[in-house]
Image (cartoon, rainbow, N blue to C red):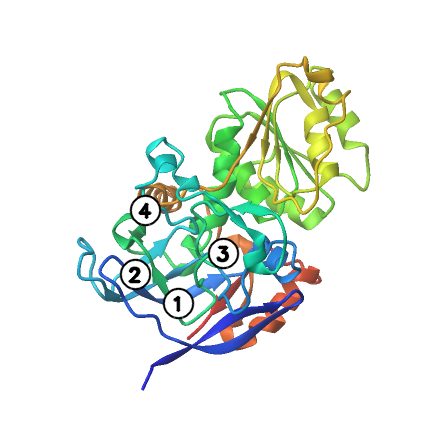
Amino acid sequence: MTAMMKAAIFIEPGRIELADKPIPDVGPNDALIRITTTTICGTDVHILKGEYPVVKGLTIGHEPVGVIEKLGSAVQGYSEGQRVIAGAICPNFNSYAAQDGVASQDGSYLIPLGLCGCHGYKATAGWRFGNLIDGTQAEYVLVPDAQANLAPIPDGLTDEQVLMCPDIMSTGFKGAENANIRIGDTVVVFAQGPIGLCATAGARLLGATTIIAVDGNDHRLGISKKLGADVTLNFNHSDVVAEIMKLTGGRGADSAIEALGTQATFESALRVLKPGGTLSSLGVYSHDLTIPMSAFAAGLGDHTIRTALCPGGKERMRRLMNVVASSRLDLGVMVTHQFKLDNIVEAYELFAHQRDGELKVAIKPW
């Protein structure tokens, strides 16, 4: 008789439900992980709303913390029963993109969206969990290319302390890394959701000395102060572009990080840049973007615009957990709610509507 597990699956736009699915078989290069904690990401909400297409019946989620239940015969250096994480991006490092230094784009091909009931194309990249293969909002997840992707959790760290590492922390830090931050820089971070908060923390670690956090939620702005922001601006109370230009003496910011994925935040990030500044874009966009000629200096401003998909792999995860273990950064404060996997539909409803100061929702299958 086939062993079964509970999993949150995509049904149709507006519907993610809990269902029974077979526990995956383990191939030679795989590892079966018993999930102890996972979470809901903003990208999962895009999937729920039908703004990012996936196939019907796919298990959603891409932030795994758990214990190795079973190892494939070819996987070395790990043991069953070991606590591990795996990045949301799980490359095999064999592709041209990975060997060209962009492991997050491992296996990035254009595939017809007709496979998802839509039209057009999307880049698949190295994001496989909850996108191309079954994800982590389940009792178990199968990690492909486990040798490259499993990272042991250091002794003494809780699930909540490392829960941000597989995606949110990696993505936010990548946004800061892409922003070309130098010691003494002024950096503006637009949106202080989980990714924006991690970008704020990353900018501080990279040496920015004036970090301006922008959001419309005073609670989140308060947390951004704890994670490294020097100045907070609520866009409901002021013209933040004008305020930032005033704060910089009309010079503009060295870098701006966009962490929401809207036309308004993207355009504002572009408008506050100094000539030669860098816009680091982290948001997942649901609509076409327009670049205003004036904000873009008619293409003559020597601006750099960089996009990012968070890096994956065990080395990236090791480095992120080192930051947590060193006590330089505590992201446990971002886990504001906990739900059992049995209540995943309720958790989605709460997280998607942001009614109770949610930052990250921890999901506990067991």
Q: Badge 1 is on which residue?
A: 36
Bin the neighbour count of mark 4 within 10 Å (Cα to Cα): few under 14, some 14-19, many 20 and up. some
Chain-order first, disc 3 or disc 2:
2
Up/down of 325 relative to 176, above or below: below
Gap in angstroms between the C-alphas marked 4 and 2? 21 Å
x, y percent for residue 198: 53, 42
| Residue for point 61% across, 60% down | 117
| Residue for point 68% across, 50% down | 219
Gap in angstroms between the C-alphas marked 4 and 3? 16 Å
- Label 2 amino acid? Arg
Chain-order first, disc 2 or disc 1:
1
Chain-order first, disc 4 or disc 2:
2
Up/down of 182 relative to 155, above or below: above
Chain-order first, disc 1 or disc 3:
1
Look at the numbered discs 1 and 4 and tell me whether their residues touch, using CB distance below 8 Å.
no
Q: Which mark is residue 83?
A: 2
Q: Identify the secondary structure beneath mark 1.
A: strand
x, y percent for residue 170: 45, 43
Q: Which mark is residue 82?
A: none
x, y percent for residue 182: 50, 21
Q: Identify the secondary structure beneath mark 4.
A: loop
The mark closer to the camera, 1 or 4, is 4
Q: Which mark is residue 131?
A: 3
The front one of 197 and 62 is 62
The mark closer to the camera, 1 or 3, is 3
